[in-house]
Image (tube, helix red, strand yellow):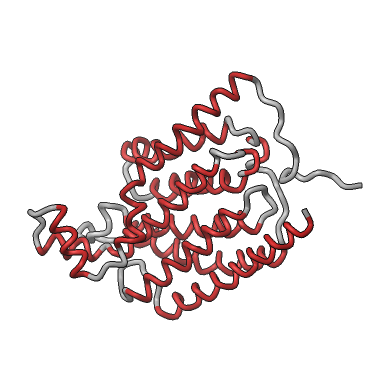
Amino acid sequence: MHTQSPATRPAPQQSRPRRITFLVLVILVPLWLLARNVFGLTEVALMWLPPEALAELLGEQDPDASTADIAAFEAHRSHYFAIGVLSWAAVLPAFAQWRRPERRVGSMQLLIAIALGSAVVYAFSGTLTEWVVEEGLLVVPIALLAAFHPRARDLLGPTGFDASMAIGAVVASVPWAVYAVVNSVRQLTASAGDPHVMPEHWATAALMGITLIAAAIIGASRADGWKLPAWIAVGGTALFAAHSLAYPGAASGLGIVWAVLAIAWAAGFAVLVVRRTAHERATA
């Protein structure tokens, strides 16, 4: 006998107040995340600019910007790029909920993972007051959206995994976990004079590593809407690795060897995503 898994089970009927609440949240939360990350979304493009072009752009935006200000901005290049990866990883799944959210379980799971990862990572690096205010602006809206989601009961339920993609996700998880731990330790142990401490950039890099792990694992699962997390894992890994090759030695950047291996992994995982997509279409 075939038993429906949580990934294919129809969404349960909801009460009218619950549906209305979700409709309001599903409009407001993505727009809030877009507004909160509008600067970060541009970073995946701006941080490719060479120092001279970046300095000229900053000078146009702020005529009073000094050479020291521009040099300080340049020192955070990889961290700003990581912010860009995180911004897209949050905004895309949020807006995916606008269309058939009952089929976007994987995207909602990634949002939950980002919220939980953010709560854990930044709790170690900020004061309690700062954490409650700053991270609450991310965690609370996502938590509300998840609570009223049409598939709320399935968001934390088991869905099974595609075997080959699960292996790929595990392969990626090990180095990204090490990356997250290393950057978390840097955030905790760096001196007060470290320019990356106050903006919590080491912690941000750690959160990017956690997010890419979550995206790969969710992408390997059999949850509805697994494709977007899978492509976020591919795109985020490939772009950050390529940026690390373009700007070697940048703070929290990948070394040359790891960057090359990361690009190779992204290419292999992309092949698995395409193959699985074709198989699902053929058997639909």
At which x and y percent is residue 93?
52, 47
- Looking at the image, residue 171 sits to the left or right of residue 65; the answer is right
Depicted 259 relative to depicted 28: above or below: below
In this view, the residue in front, 155 or 54, is 54
Q: Quadrant of residue 241?
A: bottom left
- Looking at the image, residue 83 sits to the left or right of residue 213; the answer is left
Q: Quadrant of residue 249?
A: bottom left
Depicted 160 relative to depicted 6: above or below: below
At which x and y percent is residue 239?
43, 66
Instruction: Give the mark count.
Output: 0
Looking at the image, which residue is at 51% across and 33% down?
A: 26
Looking at the image, which residue is at 31% across and 49% down?
A: 39
At which x and y percent is residue 38?
34, 46
Q: Quadrant of residue 9?
A: top right
- Looking at the image, residue 138 sits to the left or right of residue 151; the answer is left
Looking at the image, which residue is at 21% across and 61% down?
A: 73
Extreme residue in the bottom direction: 257
At which x and y percent is residue 122?
38, 48
In this view, the residue in front, 256 or 277, is 277
- Looking at the image, residue 134 sits to the left or right of residue 2; the answer is left
